[in-house]
Image (cartoon, helix red, strand yellow):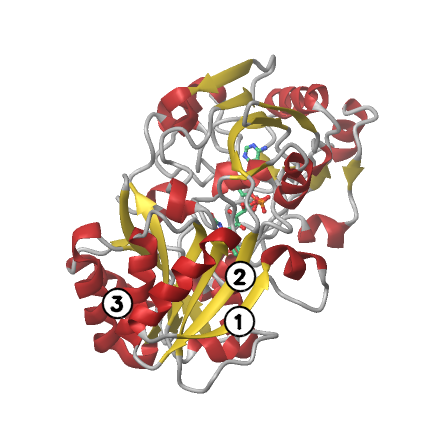
Amino acid sequence: MIDWQGFDWQGFQAELGDIPCITERALVRQKSRDFFWYSPILKAALNDKSADLVVCPRNEADVVAVSALCARHRVPLTVRGAGTGNYGQAVPLEGGVVLDMTGLNRVLSVDAGLLRVEPGCRLIDIESAVAEAGWELRMYPSTKRTATIGGFVAGGSGGIGSITYGGLRERGNIVAARVVSCEAEPRIVELTGDAINRVNHAYGTTGIITALSIPLAPRLPWVDVIAAFDDFMTAVRCARMLGLSDGIAKKLVTVLAHPLPQNLKGLTTPEGKHLVIAMIASHALTGWTDLLGDFGGTEILRRPTAEAETDAQLTPVYEYTWNHTTLHALRKDKSVTYLQSLFPADRTLELIEETYRSYGDELMIHLEFLRAGGQVTCSALQVVRFSTPERLNQIIAELEARGILIANPHVFTLEDGAGHKRIGGDQPAFKREMDPAGLLNPGKMRSFTVA
Ligand code: FAD
Protein backbone atom coordinates (compact mmCIF):
# COMPACT_ATOMS: atom_id res chain seq x y z
CA MET A 1 0.00 0.00 0.00
CA ILE A 2 1.37 3.42 -0.94
CA ASP A 3 1.93 5.87 1.89
CA TRP A 4 0.43 9.14 0.66
CA GLN A 5 1.50 11.06 3.78
CA GLY A 6 3.15 14.26 2.70
CA PHE A 7 2.40 13.90 -1.04
CA ASP A 8 1.97 17.37 -2.51
CA TRP A 9 -1.48 17.02 -4.14
CA GLN A 10 -1.81 20.78 -4.55
CA GLY A 11 1.47 20.89 -6.45
CA PHE A 12 0.31 17.91 -8.55
CA GLN A 13 -2.92 19.69 -9.36
CA ALA A 14 -1.05 22.88 -10.25
CA GLU A 15 1.01 20.89 -12.75
CA LEU A 16 -2.25 19.72 -14.37
CA GLY A 17 -2.92 23.34 -15.36
CA ASP A 18 -6.50 23.91 -16.53
CA ILE A 19 -7.50 20.23 -16.74
CA PRO A 20 -10.67 19.99 -14.56
CA CYS A 21 -10.36 18.12 -11.26
CA ILE A 22 -12.70 17.05 -8.47
CA THR A 23 -11.34 17.38 -4.94
CA GLU A 24 -14.49 17.35 -2.84
CA ARG A 25 -14.10 14.24 -0.63
CA ALA A 26 -17.66 12.89 -0.95
CA LEU A 27 -17.61 13.18 -4.74
CA VAL A 28 -14.11 11.70 -5.01
CA ARG A 29 -15.30 8.75 -2.92
CA GLN A 30 -18.44 8.37 -5.03
CA LYS A 31 -16.36 8.30 -8.21
CA SER A 32 -14.08 5.69 -6.67
CA ARG A 33 -16.88 3.14 -6.43
CA ASP A 34 -18.73 0.83 -8.76
CA PHE A 35 -21.23 -2.00 -8.24
CA PHE A 36 -18.79 -4.23 -6.27
CA TRP A 37 -21.35 -4.26 -3.44
CA TYR A 38 -23.34 -6.94 -5.31
CA SER A 39 -20.81 -9.25 -3.66
CA PRO A 40 -20.77 -9.40 0.15
CA ILE A 41 -17.14 -10.51 -0.09
CA LEU A 42 -16.06 -7.54 -2.25
CA LYS A 43 -18.18 -5.19 -0.19
CA ALA A 44 -16.10 -6.01 2.87
CA ALA A 45 -12.84 -5.79 0.92
CA LEU A 46 -13.40 -2.59 -1.07
CA ASN A 47 -15.83 -0.41 0.86
CA ASP A 48 -13.15 1.93 2.25
CA LYS A 49 -11.12 2.39 -0.95
CA SER A 50 -10.96 5.84 -2.46
CA ALA A 51 -8.89 7.91 -4.87
CA ASP A 52 -7.16 11.09 -3.73
CA LEU A 53 -8.12 13.11 -6.77
CA VAL A 54 -10.49 12.75 -9.73
CA VAL A 55 -9.21 14.23 -12.99
CA CYS A 56 -11.63 14.92 -15.86
CA PRO A 57 -9.82 15.12 -19.22
CA ARG A 58 -11.60 16.93 -22.06
CA ASN A 59 -9.66 15.37 -24.92
CA GLU A 60 -6.81 13.01 -25.75
CA ALA A 61 -4.16 15.70 -25.14
CA ASP A 62 -5.42 16.01 -21.55
CA VAL A 63 -5.25 12.21 -21.15
CA VAL A 64 -1.63 12.23 -22.34
CA ALA A 65 -0.77 15.07 -19.94
CA VAL A 66 -2.34 13.32 -16.93
CA SER A 67 -0.72 10.00 -17.81
CA ALA A 68 2.71 11.65 -18.12
CA LEU A 69 2.32 13.44 -14.80
CA CYS A 70 1.22 10.26 -13.01
CA ALA A 71 4.20 8.39 -14.48
CA ARG A 72 6.65 11.13 -13.41
CA HIS A 73 5.29 11.25 -9.84
CA ARG A 74 4.63 7.47 -9.58
CA VAL A 75 0.94 8.13 -8.89
CA PRO A 76 -1.53 5.23 -9.54
CA LEU A 77 -4.06 6.00 -12.25
CA THR A 78 -7.40 4.20 -12.46
CA VAL A 79 -9.55 4.87 -15.50
CA ARG A 80 -13.32 5.19 -15.09
CA GLY A 81 -16.28 5.33 -17.47
CA ALA A 82 -19.70 5.48 -15.81
CA GLY A 83 -18.68 3.24 -12.87
CA THR A 84 -21.35 0.57 -13.50
CA GLY A 85 -18.82 -2.26 -13.55
CA ASN A 86 -19.05 -5.10 -11.09
CA TYR A 87 -16.19 -6.63 -9.12
CA GLY A 88 -14.52 -3.32 -8.23
CA GLN A 89 -13.03 -3.01 -11.70
CA ALA A 90 -12.82 0.80 -11.42
CA VAL A 91 -12.05 0.97 -7.70
CA PRO A 92 -8.59 2.47 -7.03
CA LEU A 93 -7.06 -0.02 -4.58
CA GLU A 94 -3.98 2.15 -3.99
CA GLY A 95 -5.64 5.58 -4.07
CA GLY A 96 -4.08 8.14 -6.44
CA VAL A 97 -5.94 9.48 -9.46
CA VAL A 98 -9.25 8.35 -10.92
CA LEU A 99 -9.45 9.44 -14.54
CA ASP A 100 -13.07 10.20 -15.41
CA MET A 101 -13.34 9.62 -19.17
CA THR A 102 -16.91 10.86 -19.63
CA GLY A 103 -15.65 14.15 -21.13
CA LEU A 104 -14.31 12.27 -24.17
CA ASN A 105 -17.77 11.55 -25.52
CA ARG A 106 -17.84 12.42 -29.22
CA VAL A 107 -19.01 10.17 -32.03
CA LEU A 108 -16.20 10.74 -34.52
CA SER A 109 -17.60 9.01 -37.62
CA VAL A 110 -20.09 6.45 -38.89
CA ASP A 111 -18.98 5.00 -42.18
CA ALA A 112 -20.14 1.83 -43.97
CA GLY A 113 -21.31 0.23 -40.72
CA LEU A 114 -18.19 1.16 -38.75
CA LEU A 115 -18.38 3.54 -35.81
CA ARG A 116 -15.40 5.56 -34.58
CA VAL A 117 -16.12 6.92 -31.14
CA GLU A 118 -14.47 8.35 -28.04
CA PRO A 119 -14.57 6.00 -25.03
CA GLY A 120 -16.63 8.16 -22.68
CA CYS A 121 -19.65 8.21 -25.00
CA ARG A 122 -22.68 6.55 -23.40
CA LEU A 123 -24.05 3.55 -25.27
CA ILE A 124 -27.52 5.07 -25.40
CA ASP A 125 -26.08 8.21 -27.03
CA ILE A 126 -24.26 6.07 -29.59
CA GLU A 127 -27.54 4.32 -30.43
CA SER A 128 -29.24 7.69 -31.05
CA ALA A 129 -26.31 8.99 -33.11
CA VAL A 130 -26.08 5.98 -35.44
CA ALA A 131 -29.85 5.44 -35.78
CA GLU A 132 -30.22 8.24 -38.32
CA ALA A 133 -27.91 6.42 -40.70
CA GLY A 134 -29.85 3.15 -40.21
CA TRP A 135 -27.45 1.44 -37.78
CA GLU A 136 -27.47 0.16 -34.21
CA LEU A 137 -24.94 -1.39 -31.82
CA ARG A 138 -24.38 -5.11 -32.36
CA MET A 139 -24.51 -5.58 -28.60
CA TYR A 140 -24.74 -3.65 -25.38
CA PRO A 141 -24.90 -4.42 -21.67
CA SER A 142 -28.21 -4.07 -19.83
CA THR A 143 -26.68 -0.83 -18.46
CA LYS A 144 -26.93 0.70 -21.96
CA ARG A 145 -28.68 3.80 -20.61
CA THR A 146 -25.78 4.69 -18.27
CA ALA A 147 -22.59 2.85 -19.26
CA THR A 148 -19.89 4.09 -21.65
CA ILE A 149 -18.47 2.26 -24.66
CA GLY A 150 -14.92 2.44 -23.21
CA GLY A 151 -16.08 0.86 -19.95
CA PHE A 152 -17.94 -1.84 -21.89
CA VAL A 153 -14.87 -2.75 -23.95
CA ALA A 154 -12.46 -2.59 -20.99
CA GLY A 155 -14.75 -4.15 -18.40
CA GLY A 156 -17.75 -5.87 -19.98
CA SER A 157 -18.24 -9.19 -21.70
CA GLY A 158 -21.39 -9.07 -23.83
CA GLY A 159 -25.10 -8.67 -23.43
CA ILE A 160 -28.14 -7.77 -25.49
CA GLY A 161 -27.16 -8.79 -29.02
CA SER A 162 -24.82 -11.63 -27.96
CA ILE A 163 -27.45 -14.19 -29.06
CA THR A 164 -26.59 -13.13 -32.61
CA TYR A 165 -23.03 -11.80 -32.44
CA GLY A 166 -21.50 -13.66 -29.48
CA GLY A 167 -19.55 -11.89 -26.76
CA LEU A 168 -17.32 -8.85 -27.11
CA ARG A 169 -14.32 -11.20 -27.20
CA GLU A 170 -15.61 -12.87 -30.38
CA ARG A 171 -13.26 -11.98 -33.25
CA GLY A 172 -14.57 -8.99 -35.25
CA ASN A 173 -16.76 -7.42 -32.56
CA ILE A 174 -14.18 -4.68 -31.88
CA VAL A 175 -12.23 -3.42 -34.88
CA ALA A 176 -9.66 -1.01 -33.43
CA ALA A 177 -8.64 0.78 -30.25
CA ARG A 178 -6.40 3.81 -29.79
CA VAL A 179 -4.49 3.48 -26.52
CA VAL A 180 -2.30 5.85 -24.47
CA SER A 181 0.57 4.41 -22.40
CA CYS A 182 1.45 5.43 -18.86
CA GLU A 183 5.01 6.71 -19.16
CA ALA A 184 6.81 10.00 -18.62
CA GLU A 185 6.45 10.50 -22.35
CA PRO A 186 3.28 8.57 -23.22
CA ARG A 187 3.02 6.79 -26.55
CA ILE A 188 -0.18 6.32 -28.51
CA VAL A 189 -0.76 2.91 -30.06
CA GLU A 190 -3.52 1.82 -32.46
CA LEU A 191 -4.48 -1.81 -31.92
CA THR A 192 -6.35 -3.81 -34.56
CA GLY A 193 -7.33 -7.43 -35.16
CA ASP A 194 -6.52 -9.94 -32.41
CA ALA A 195 -4.30 -7.32 -30.71
CA ILE A 196 -7.57 -5.76 -29.47
CA ASN A 197 -7.57 -8.42 -26.75
CA ARG A 198 -4.69 -6.55 -25.10
CA VAL A 199 -7.23 -3.97 -23.88
CA ASN A 200 -10.54 -5.85 -24.11
CA HIS A 201 -11.62 -6.86 -20.58
CA ALA A 202 -8.26 -5.71 -19.17
CA TYR A 203 -9.87 -3.30 -16.64
CA GLY A 204 -7.73 -0.41 -17.93
CA THR A 205 -4.54 -2.09 -16.65
CA THR A 206 -2.82 -2.11 -20.03
CA GLY A 207 -3.49 1.41 -21.33
CA ILE A 208 -5.99 4.22 -21.57
CA ILE A 209 -8.38 3.87 -24.51
CA THR A 210 -9.02 7.20 -26.24
CA ALA A 211 -10.91 6.00 -29.33
CA LEU A 212 -12.60 2.84 -30.55
CA SER A 213 -13.77 1.46 -33.90
CA ILE A 214 -16.86 -0.68 -33.40
CA PRO A 215 -18.79 -2.54 -36.13
CA LEU A 216 -22.52 -1.83 -36.21
CA ALA A 217 -25.59 -3.84 -37.21
CA PRO A 218 -28.46 -2.78 -39.50
CA ARG A 219 -31.10 -1.10 -37.35
CA LEU A 220 -34.29 -3.08 -36.68
CA PRO A 221 -37.54 -2.15 -34.92
CA TRP A 222 -37.28 -4.32 -31.79
CA VAL A 223 -40.27 -5.52 -29.82
CA ASP A 224 -40.10 -6.51 -26.15
CA VAL A 225 -41.92 -9.74 -25.40
CA ILE A 226 -42.40 -11.80 -22.24
CA ALA A 227 -43.96 -15.27 -22.07
CA ALA A 228 -44.96 -17.23 -18.96
CA PHE A 229 -44.62 -21.00 -18.49
CA ASP A 230 -45.85 -23.48 -15.87
CA ASP A 231 -42.82 -25.71 -16.26
CA PHE A 232 -39.23 -24.46 -15.98
CA MET A 233 -37.60 -26.85 -18.43
CA THR A 234 -40.30 -26.12 -21.04
CA ALA A 235 -39.39 -22.43 -20.76
CA VAL A 236 -35.71 -23.33 -21.16
CA ARG A 237 -36.39 -25.50 -24.23
CA CYS A 238 -38.49 -22.76 -25.81
CA ALA A 239 -35.74 -20.18 -25.20
CA ARG A 240 -33.07 -22.47 -26.60
CA MET A 241 -35.17 -23.14 -29.69
CA LEU A 242 -35.61 -19.40 -30.15
CA GLY A 243 -31.83 -19.08 -29.89
CA LEU A 244 -31.40 -21.76 -32.55
CA SER A 245 -34.07 -20.31 -34.89
CA ASP A 246 -31.79 -18.38 -37.23
CA GLY A 247 -34.74 -17.09 -39.27
CA ILE A 248 -36.19 -15.21 -36.29
CA ALA A 249 -34.23 -11.97 -35.80
CA LYS A 250 -33.75 -11.45 -32.08
CA LYS A 251 -31.56 -9.44 -29.74
CA LEU A 252 -32.23 -11.06 -26.38
CA VAL A 253 -33.27 -14.48 -25.03
CA THR A 254 -33.51 -14.74 -21.24
CA VAL A 255 -35.05 -17.27 -18.86
CA LEU A 256 -35.98 -16.42 -15.27
CA ALA A 257 -37.02 -19.27 -13.00
CA HIS A 258 -39.66 -18.71 -10.36
CA PRO A 259 -39.37 -16.88 -7.92
CA LEU A 260 -37.10 -14.36 -9.75
CA PRO A 261 -39.98 -12.81 -11.82
CA GLN A 262 -41.61 -11.63 -8.56
CA ASN A 263 -38.73 -9.14 -8.09
CA LEU A 264 -39.10 -7.28 -11.38
CA LYS A 265 -40.02 -3.69 -10.64
CA GLY A 266 -42.89 -2.35 -12.77
CA LEU A 267 -43.99 -5.79 -13.98
CA THR A 268 -46.85 -7.85 -12.62
CA THR A 269 -46.28 -11.51 -13.37
CA PRO A 270 -48.60 -14.44 -12.77
CA GLU A 271 -47.71 -16.20 -9.48
CA GLY A 272 -45.48 -19.26 -9.68
CA LYS A 273 -44.60 -18.96 -13.38
CA HIS A 274 -41.23 -19.06 -15.14
CA LEU A 275 -40.52 -16.41 -17.78
CA VAL A 276 -38.89 -16.18 -21.19
CA ILE A 277 -37.97 -12.57 -21.93
CA ALA A 278 -36.95 -11.67 -25.48
CA MET A 279 -36.48 -8.87 -27.97
CA ILE A 280 -37.77 -9.84 -31.42
CA ALA A 281 -37.67 -7.85 -34.68
CA SER A 282 -41.20 -6.73 -35.53
CA HIS A 283 -41.17 -8.68 -38.82
CA ALA A 284 -40.32 -11.89 -36.91
CA LEU A 285 -43.20 -11.76 -34.43
CA THR A 286 -45.25 -14.37 -36.30
CA GLY A 287 -42.34 -16.77 -36.03
CA TRP A 288 -42.14 -16.05 -32.31
CA THR A 289 -45.87 -16.62 -31.84
CA ASP A 290 -45.70 -19.96 -33.67
CA LEU A 291 -42.70 -21.04 -31.63
CA LEU A 292 -44.44 -20.09 -28.40
CA GLY A 293 -47.46 -22.15 -29.51
CA ASP A 294 -45.21 -25.19 -29.96
CA PHE A 295 -44.16 -24.95 -26.29
CA GLY A 296 -47.48 -23.86 -24.78
CA GLY A 297 -46.21 -20.54 -23.37
CA THR A 298 -48.53 -17.58 -22.73
CA GLU A 299 -47.43 -14.16 -23.90
CA ILE A 300 -47.92 -11.62 -21.09
CA LEU A 301 -46.21 -8.58 -22.63
CA ARG A 302 -45.62 -7.22 -26.12
CA ARG A 303 -44.44 -3.63 -26.63
CA PRO A 304 -41.94 -1.82 -28.89
CA THR A 305 -38.58 -1.49 -27.13
CA ALA A 306 -38.32 2.14 -28.26
CA GLU A 307 -41.60 2.98 -26.51
CA ALA A 308 -40.30 1.68 -23.18
CA GLU A 309 -36.98 3.49 -23.67
CA THR A 310 -38.67 6.85 -24.15
CA ASP A 311 -41.44 6.63 -21.53
CA ALA A 312 -40.12 7.22 -17.99
CA GLN A 313 -43.00 5.15 -16.56
CA LEU A 314 -41.94 2.03 -18.47
CA THR A 315 -38.93 -0.30 -18.29
CA PRO A 316 -37.41 -1.80 -21.44
CA VAL A 317 -37.25 -5.58 -20.91
CA TYR A 318 -33.46 -5.60 -21.26
CA GLU A 319 -33.39 -3.90 -17.85
CA TYR A 320 -34.90 -7.09 -16.41
CA THR A 321 -32.06 -9.19 -17.83
CA TRP A 322 -28.30 -9.77 -17.61
CA ASN A 323 -27.01 -8.23 -14.40
CA HIS A 324 -30.16 -6.16 -13.93
CA THR A 325 -31.93 -9.34 -12.78
CA THR A 326 -29.57 -9.43 -9.79
CA LEU A 327 -30.22 -5.75 -9.10
CA HIS A 328 -34.00 -6.34 -8.99
CA ALA A 329 -33.44 -9.25 -6.58
CA LEU A 330 -31.11 -7.17 -4.40
CA ARG A 331 -33.71 -4.41 -4.17
CA LYS A 332 -36.10 -6.92 -2.60
CA ASP A 333 -33.57 -8.81 -0.47
CA LYS A 334 -30.18 -7.30 0.37
CA SER A 335 -28.80 -10.67 1.46
CA VAL A 336 -28.72 -12.27 -1.99
CA THR A 337 -25.79 -12.27 -4.37
CA TYR A 338 -24.98 -13.95 -7.68
CA LEU A 339 -22.73 -16.11 -9.84
CA GLN A 340 -21.69 -15.96 -13.48
CA SER A 341 -21.34 -19.16 -15.41
CA LEU A 342 -21.08 -20.50 -18.94
CA PHE A 343 -22.64 -23.83 -19.88
CA PRO A 344 -20.95 -26.09 -22.44
CA ALA A 345 -22.94 -25.99 -25.70
CA ASP A 346 -23.22 -29.78 -25.99
CA ARG A 347 -24.71 -30.35 -22.49
CA THR A 348 -26.66 -27.15 -21.92
CA LEU A 349 -30.12 -28.62 -21.21
CA GLU A 350 -28.84 -31.52 -19.12
CA LEU A 351 -26.69 -29.27 -16.88
CA ILE A 352 -29.38 -26.61 -16.51
CA GLU A 353 -31.85 -29.24 -15.30
CA GLU A 354 -29.28 -30.75 -12.94
CA THR A 355 -28.45 -27.42 -11.28
CA TYR A 356 -32.12 -26.42 -11.16
CA ARG A 357 -33.03 -29.64 -9.32
CA SER A 358 -29.94 -29.69 -7.03
CA TYR A 359 -30.08 -26.36 -5.24
CA GLY A 360 -33.73 -25.34 -4.90
CA ASP A 361 -34.14 -21.71 -3.89
CA GLU A 362 -30.51 -21.39 -2.78
CA LEU A 363 -29.61 -20.94 -6.48
CA MET A 364 -32.35 -19.16 -8.41
CA ILE A 365 -31.78 -19.81 -12.09
CA HIS A 366 -31.36 -16.93 -14.53
CA LEU A 367 -30.16 -17.86 -18.03
CA GLU A 368 -28.97 -15.73 -20.93
CA PHE A 369 -28.80 -17.58 -24.24
CA LEU A 370 -25.93 -16.48 -26.47
CA ARG A 371 -23.62 -17.59 -29.21
CA ALA A 372 -20.10 -18.67 -28.31
CA GLY A 373 -17.77 -19.76 -31.07
CA GLY A 374 -20.76 -20.03 -33.41
CA GLN A 375 -22.74 -22.38 -31.15
CA VAL A 376 -25.83 -21.47 -29.16
CA THR A 377 -25.26 -21.99 -25.47
CA CYS A 378 -26.14 -20.09 -22.36
CA SER A 379 -24.63 -18.13 -19.61
CA ALA A 380 -26.24 -18.14 -16.18
CA LEU A 381 -26.24 -15.33 -13.67
CA GLN A 382 -27.76 -17.38 -10.88
CA VAL A 383 -29.07 -15.40 -7.91
CA VAL A 384 -27.68 -16.99 -4.75
CA ARG A 385 -29.10 -16.95 -1.23
CA PHE A 386 -25.81 -16.09 0.46
CA SER A 387 -24.92 -17.77 3.74
CA THR A 388 -21.12 -17.90 4.08
CA PRO A 389 -18.13 -17.43 1.76
CA GLU A 390 -17.28 -21.11 2.34
CA ARG A 391 -20.70 -22.26 1.11
CA LEU A 392 -20.44 -19.95 -1.92
CA ASN A 393 -17.04 -21.41 -2.80
CA GLN A 394 -18.43 -24.91 -2.33
CA ILE A 395 -21.24 -24.19 -4.83
CA ILE A 396 -18.67 -22.75 -7.29
CA ALA A 397 -16.51 -25.88 -6.94
CA GLU A 398 -19.52 -28.18 -7.45
CA LEU A 399 -20.62 -26.33 -10.59
CA GLU A 400 -17.07 -26.38 -11.97
CA ALA A 401 -16.84 -30.11 -11.27
CA ARG A 402 -19.95 -30.57 -13.45
CA GLY A 403 -18.16 -28.82 -16.35
CA ILE A 404 -19.79 -25.39 -15.95
CA LEU A 405 -17.31 -22.53 -16.36
CA ILE A 406 -17.45 -19.96 -13.56
CA ALA A 407 -16.34 -16.33 -13.95
CA ASN A 408 -16.20 -15.56 -10.24
CA PRO A 409 -17.77 -12.15 -9.50
CA HIS A 410 -16.52 -12.19 -5.90
CA VAL A 411 -12.88 -11.39 -6.70
CA PHE A 412 -11.34 -8.23 -8.12
CA THR A 413 -8.30 -9.54 -10.02
CA LEU A 414 -8.38 -10.37 -13.71
CA GLU A 415 -6.85 -13.80 -13.12
CA ASP A 416 -9.25 -14.96 -10.40
CA GLY A 417 -12.35 -13.63 -12.15
CA ALA A 418 -11.63 -15.21 -15.52
CA GLY A 419 -13.51 -18.36 -16.48
CA HIS A 420 -10.29 -20.24 -17.22
CA LYS A 421 -8.38 -18.70 -14.26
CA ARG A 422 -5.95 -16.95 -16.59
CA ILE A 423 -5.95 -13.59 -18.29
CA GLY A 424 -6.53 -13.02 -21.95
CA GLY A 425 -3.92 -13.26 -24.71
CA ASP A 426 -0.83 -11.18 -24.31
CA GLN A 427 -2.20 -8.69 -21.77
CA PRO A 428 0.72 -9.11 -19.29
CA ALA A 429 3.34 -8.49 -22.01
CA PHE A 430 1.41 -5.49 -23.31
CA LYS A 431 1.14 -4.10 -19.78
CA ARG A 432 4.89 -4.31 -19.39
CA GLU A 433 5.19 -2.26 -22.58
CA MET A 434 2.48 0.31 -21.84
CA ASP A 435 2.73 0.58 -18.06
CA PRO A 436 6.24 -0.43 -16.99
CA ALA A 437 5.85 1.02 -13.48
CA GLY A 438 2.53 -0.78 -12.88
CA LEU A 439 0.56 2.42 -12.22
CA LEU A 440 -2.60 1.60 -14.20
CA ASN A 441 -5.32 0.24 -11.89
CA PRO A 442 -2.73 -1.41 -9.59
CA GLY A 443 -3.68 -4.69 -7.92
CA LYS A 444 -6.08 -5.84 -10.64
CA MET A 445 -3.52 -7.84 -12.66
CA ARG A 446 -2.27 -10.05 -9.86
CA SER A 447 0.50 -11.72 -11.84
CA PHE A 448 2.14 -8.42 -12.85
CA THR A 449 5.28 -7.37 -11.04
CA VAL A 450 7.34 -4.30 -11.82
CA ALA A 451 10.52 -5.31 -13.67
P1 FAD B 1 -16.68 1.40 -15.67
O1 FAD B 1 -17.37 0.60 -14.63
O2 FAD B 1 -16.44 2.81 -15.36
O3 FAD B 1 -15.29 0.72 -16.02
C1 FAD B 1 -15.20 -0.65 -16.29
C2 FAD B 1 -13.72 -1.00 -16.45
O4 FAD B 1 -13.23 -0.41 -17.63
C3 FAD B 1 -12.83 -0.47 -15.31
O5 FAD B 1 -11.83 -1.41 -15.02
C4 FAD B 1 -12.21 0.78 -15.90
O6 FAD B 1 -10.94 1.02 -15.33
C5 FAD B 1 -12.10 0.42 -17.37
N1 FAD B 1 -12.20 1.56 -18.29
C6 FAD B 1 -13.22 2.43 -18.42
N2 FAD B 1 -12.96 3.32 -19.40
C7 FAD B 1 -11.74 2.99 -19.89
C8 FAD B 1 -10.90 3.55 -20.91
N3 FAD B 1 -11.26 4.61 -21.63
N4 FAD B 1 -9.69 2.97 -21.12
C9 FAD B 1 -9.28 1.88 -20.41
N5 FAD B 1 -10.03 1.32 -19.44
C10 FAD B 1 -11.24 1.87 -19.19
N6 FAD B 1 -21.70 -6.03 -18.23
C11 FAD B 1 -21.84 -6.73 -19.39
O7 FAD B 1 -20.86 -7.03 -20.04
N7 FAD B 1 -23.09 -7.09 -19.81
C12 FAD B 1 -24.22 -6.77 -19.15
O8 FAD B 1 -25.30 -7.03 -19.62
C13 FAD B 1 -24.09 -6.07 -17.91
N8 FAD B 1 -25.18 -5.74 -17.18
C14 FAD B 1 -25.02 -5.04 -16.01
C15 FAD B 1 -26.15 -4.68 -15.25
C16 FAD B 1 -26.01 -3.99 -14.05
C17 FAD B 1 -27.23 -3.57 -13.29
C18 FAD B 1 -24.72 -3.65 -13.60
C19 FAD B 1 -24.53 -2.90 -12.33
C20 FAD B 1 -23.61 -3.99 -14.34
C21 FAD B 1 -23.74 -4.67 -15.55
N9 FAD B 1 -22.63 -4.98 -16.35
C22 FAD B 1 -22.78 -5.70 -17.50
C23 FAD B 1 -21.32 -4.43 -16.01
C24 FAD B 1 -21.14 -2.99 -16.60
O9 FAD B 1 -22.34 -2.26 -16.52
C25 FAD B 1 -20.72 -2.99 -18.06
O10 FAD B 1 -19.60 -3.79 -18.27
C26 FAD B 1 -20.49 -1.56 -18.56
O11 FAD B 1 -20.30 -1.61 -19.93
C27 FAD B 1 -19.32 -0.86 -17.91
O12 FAD B 1 -19.24 0.45 -18.45
P2 FAD B 1 -18.87 1.70 -17.53
O13 FAD B 1 -18.79 2.89 -18.40
O14 FAD B 1 -19.77 1.81 -16.37
O15 FAD B 1 -17.40 1.25 -17.08
The circle on residue 167 is none
Disc 1 residue lies near ligand 1 with CB under 8 A: no
Horizontal and vertical percent position of residue 126: 64, 38
User: How many numbered badges does the structure rendering display?
Assistant: 3
* Relative depth, front residue between 140 and 429: 140
Q: CA distance from mark 2 to mark 1?
A: 7 Å
Instruction: Name the residue nearer the viewer: 145 or 288.
Output: 288
Viewer-nearest residue: 197 or 314: 314
Dot 2: element = strand
Where does label 2 land, which residue?
A: 224
At which x and y percent is residue 433?
44, 17
Is 95 positioned to the left or the right of 397 in the image? right
Judge: label 2 CB < 8 Å from ligand 1.
no
Disc 3 target residue? 395
Amino acid type at image mark 3: Ile
Secondary structure under the numbered disc 3 in the rendered image: helix
Kind of residue at badge 1 = Leu
Any part of residue 128 in sight: yes
In which image quadrant can residue 124 be found?
A: top right
Horizontal and vertical percent position of residue 323:
48, 59
Structural distance between the alpha carbons of marks 1 and 3: 34 Å
- Label 1 residue SS: strand
Q: Tell me which numbered mark, 3 or 2, is placed earlier along the sequence.
A: 2
Q: Residue furthest bottom?
A: 271
Q: Which mark is residue 301?
A: 1
Please tell me whether mark 3 or mark 2 is closer to you in this view: 2
Q: Is residue 98 above or below residue 320?
A: above
Q: Earlier in the sequence, mark 2 or mark 1?
A: 2
Q: Quadrant of residue 306?
A: bottom right
